Image: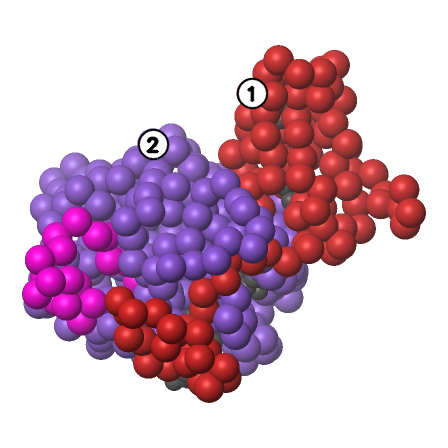
Amino acid sequence: MIDIKKESRGYIAHGVSACAGCGMELILRTVLNALGQDTTLVIPPGCSALFCGFGKETGLKVSTFQGNLENSAAYAAGIRAGYEVQGNNHSTVVAFAGDGGTLDIGLQSLSGMMERGDDVLYICYDNEAYMNTGIQGSSATPLGAWTTTTPTGKPVYKKDLLGIAMAHGIPYCASASVANIKDMTKKVEKAKSIQGPKLLHIHCPCPTGWGSAPSKSIEVSKKAVQTGAWVLYECEDGNIKLNNPPKELKAVQEYTKLQKRFSGINEEQLVALQMGITKNFERLMRMQAE
Amino acid sequence: MLNQQETVMNKQKRFKIQGPCAYEFDSGNTGSWRIERPQVDFETCVKCGTCATYCPANVITIEKDKEICVDIMWDYCKGCGICANECPKQCITMVEERCGK
Ligand SMILES: Cc1ncc(C[n+]2csc(CCOP(=O)(O)OP(=O)(O)O)c2C)c(N)n1
Ligand code: SF4
Ligand code: SF4
Ligand code: SF4
Ligand SMILES: [Mg+2]
């Protein structure tokens, strides 16, 4: 159905308009490599909409639908239902949405999808703010981080997306990061093989919004994992498993000092941020042991 | 936009699609963004593929049997420097991109 004007290997054009060093570009390439051609994507407005291209041009070889910010999960569920009527049970239906489109305005739509048990893979790439509209804070922005709407640092903690997913009792959900591409690939493949609603929450370095050097995107993500600011784990049928957790957490400054969004953080906020991170890590370790 | 695209979509017999639809797979010349370019020291390179794994633009090919063992598509490399930062042998240097060279 599509005219190939410039060939690429893989399912995504090489020259797309994501910023230099963008984590989201690497995430979608990894995801589609793992899923293959028989995939249908739903992409809401946000940075990921750039893959859909402009006008008659697209940067994707797989069929993609660009919907609205608030209802990617509902669109995906509808497409799945349509496929079932057609007798198509082989295509993987995937929603690929940002943190704003997932944890804020898309949350009720996602909740409905998880409640109904629709056979959809929902992926949230989390760059921790509304980046495409100019870095406004979202409920995924971490405590103390600067955004244009949190000029003195966000006063409250980040929302726990996987906690919300687990409360719905879905068969599989996991966190992932560009810090570990193998782990991400494994989780995407596992999610594909499971029937029902699946959720992947993927940490997404954003040099433009985080004020980090484009060359350091992977380094920043690795520091997030080593400090516990991002924990890699999965939950299958209610059982939590941490994936290769650090034996001891590094101090959170190792992570924050690489990013300008934390340059104005005060002592009090830093202590609170560290406390939240340590508590969350210990909580997950306890849940794994249960 | 709707009109322009309907003309194309209407020619297709099998699929009746309403609304704007993209049907050309194309690629921008993002190589023109580059301020610095990655320069690989092929002598010290151990062909591990780490640079290729992390390149967000997917423009690195490891050619184990060739002298230029790390082949980069210059039309698209954005010069982000991730490959240089992640190479375990530190054999990639970011050098200034100059016009006309
Ligand atoms: C209902 C609605 N409100 C606002 C917008 C404007 N808008 C477009 S993209 C975007 C940012 C989305 O942020 P996120 O989902 O985190 O994705 P990111 O841009 O960070 O990749 C917003 C607010 C919209 N398209 N629809
Ligand atoms: S603003 Fe951030 S997420 Fe959006 S394209 Fe640029 S680097 Fe990627
Ligand atoms: S990461 Fe470095 S050593 Fe490994 S293939 Fe690339 S250039 Fe060679
Ligand atoms: S500079 Fe960036 S885009 Fe260019 S080859 Fe290295 S990682 Fe890829
Ligand atoms: Mg975002």
Q: Is residue A81 above or below residue A192?
A: below
Magenta span covers which residues?
A78-95
In the picture, residue B74 is in which quadrant? top right
Residue B9 relative to residue A208: left or right: left
User: Visible in this render: residue A284?
Assistant: no
Q: In the figure, what tint was chain A given?
A: purple
In the picture, residue A120 is in which quadrant? bottom left
Q: Are marks 2 and 1 in contact (CB under 8 Å)?
A: no
Q: Residue at x 45, y 65 (%)?
A: B23
The quadrant of the rendering that contains the C terminus of chain A is top left
Residue A90 colored magenta? yes
Q: Residue A3: percent from the left, percent from the top?
A: 48, 58
Q: Residue at x 45, y 69 (%)?
A: B22
For ligand 3, tell me if the residue under mark 1 lies within 8 Å.
yes
Question: In the rendered image, which residue does mark 2 sit on?
Answer: A244
Residue A184 relative to residue B27: left or right: left
Residue A202 colored magenta? no
Looking at the image, which is closer to me, A175 or A228? A175
Q: Pointer 2 indicates a residue of which chain?
A: A
Asked which secondary structure carries label 2, the reply is loop
The residue carrying pointer 1 sits among few (fewer than 14), some (14 to 19) or many (20 or more) residues within 10 Å by Cα, namely few
**Total number of numbered discs in the rendering:** 2
User: Visible in this render: residue A74?
Assistant: yes
The quadrant of the rendering that contains the N terminus of chain A is bottom left
Q: Residue A59: percent from the left, percent from the top?
A: 50, 58
Looking at the image, which is closer to me, A127 or A284? A127
Question: In the rendered image, which residue does mark 1 sit on?
Answer: B48
- What amino acid type is highlighted by mark number 1? Cys
- Chain in red, by letter, is B
The residue carrying pointer 2 sits among few (fewer than 14), some (14 to 19) or many (20 or more) residues within 10 Å by Cα, namely few
Q: Is residue A103 above or below residue A217?
A: below
